[in-house]
Structure formats: structure tokens, C-alpha cells
Image (cartoon, helix red, strand yellow):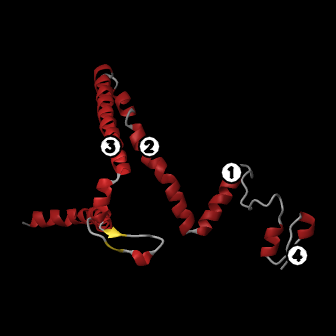
Amino acid sequence: MKDRRTAMAMVSPTVVIVALVFVYPLLVSLWTSFQYKVLSQPDLNRFYGLGNYQWLWKEPRFWDAFSRSIVFLVFTVALSIAVGMLVALLLDHYCSHWPWLKALYLVPMVVTPVVVALPAGEYHVKASNPAFSQALEFDLSVAAGGVMSNAPATGGRTSWSRRAHGTPSTASSTGCTGTTS
């Protein structure tokens, strides 16, 4: 009995996350499908019941899109299974004495999530710590030989920085218009 409780305690966080990430949006989508909503006129929103489904059943554009999606699904799944099986059989038959070659086919599945996650991680670091972000950009500009610049695109004018720090501007000599601070 204690092992069962321990197992339930270990599985329950995953069940909660799956419920929050998958089941809740599914239920909200189902509830929304029973609503009549006009985003530009929220006062027209009301419960519509099966009216949306009755309208969808009669809509020719829906059936056209649905049939194209089914055809695409059937052929894509069939083709993917056939090509995958063919590659697996060929690898097993011809490359059985080179196991590293079989592992080489797994590299795209391992590398792709990492490559996709890198920009998201960099954005999170920049958004959460501006000081670190500035230091990182400075290091990158120095590493690039000073090619990268943190200054905004001003066409070579530097009056934007002088105004921000209260230094007299050279607006007339740089072609900028406006008043100085």
C-alpha cells in the first residue's frame, strides 16, 4: 500500500501538468465552440449551443478544407511510415557492422530541440537581466572586432546620446532637427 502511495505521489505532478497543458485548453475550446462571439463587438457574445456546428455542417468551404486535410493526413502518414521503415531496414541490413552510422541518424532529433531552445533562452536572459544583456552584447561586439555596434541606427549621428546625458547637442552640424535639453 505504501508503494502505491509513493507511486501516486510521483506521478501526480505529471498528471496535473498534462491536465493543465492539454485537458484544460481542450475543455475551453469545446466551451468556446458553443458560443457566438464577435471580437469587435463583445456585447453580442452569447451562448449559441450547437448552432455553430449546424452552420459548419452546411458550409462547403469547411468540407473542402476537411477533405484536403484528410487526404494530406493519410498520404503523409503512409509515406512517412513507408520511408521510415525502408530506411530502418536498409540501415539494419547494410550497416549492422557500423553501429555509429545508425546513431548518426538520431543526431537531427537530438540537435533540433537544442537549436530551437537557444534563442528562447537568450531572450529570457536578456529580458530578465538587462545588465547581463549589456555585458553580453559588449563582449560580442569586442569579440567581433568592434564591428557590432550597440548604438541605434542614426546614420552616424551621435546627438542621441548627448541629449540623453544632458550634454549640448550638435544637432545643426549633424543634420538633426529639434531642441536640445
Between marks 3 and 2 in the image, the one whose residue lies nearer the viewer: 3
**Quadrant (top left/top right/bottom left/bottom right) for the C terminus:** bottom right
Instruction: For label 4, count other residues whose C-alpha is less than 10 Å away and answer few (under 14), some (14-19) or many (20+).
Output: few
**Nearest the camera: 16 or 23?**
23
Q: Name the quadrant containing residue 172.
A: bottom right
Circles 1 and 4: CB distance less than 8 Å? no
Q: Is residue 151 above or below residue 82?
A: below
Circle nearer the N terminus (1, 4): 1
Mark earlier in primary sequence (3, 1): 3
- Could you tell me the amino acid type at mark 4? Pro
Q: Position of residue 99 (x, y in %)?
A: 33, 28
Q: Earlier in the sequence, mark 1 or mark 2?
A: 2
Give x and y (percent) for residue 71: 32, 38
Q: Can the viewer see residue 20 in this picture?
A: no
In the image, what residue occupies the spot 11% across and 63% down?
A: 4
Question: Residue flagged by tag 1: what amino acid is it?
Answer: Ala
Distance CA(mark 1)–CA(mark 4): 32 Å
Q: Residue 104 appears in which quarter of the rendering?
A: top left
Vertical relation: 159 (above or below) 59:
below
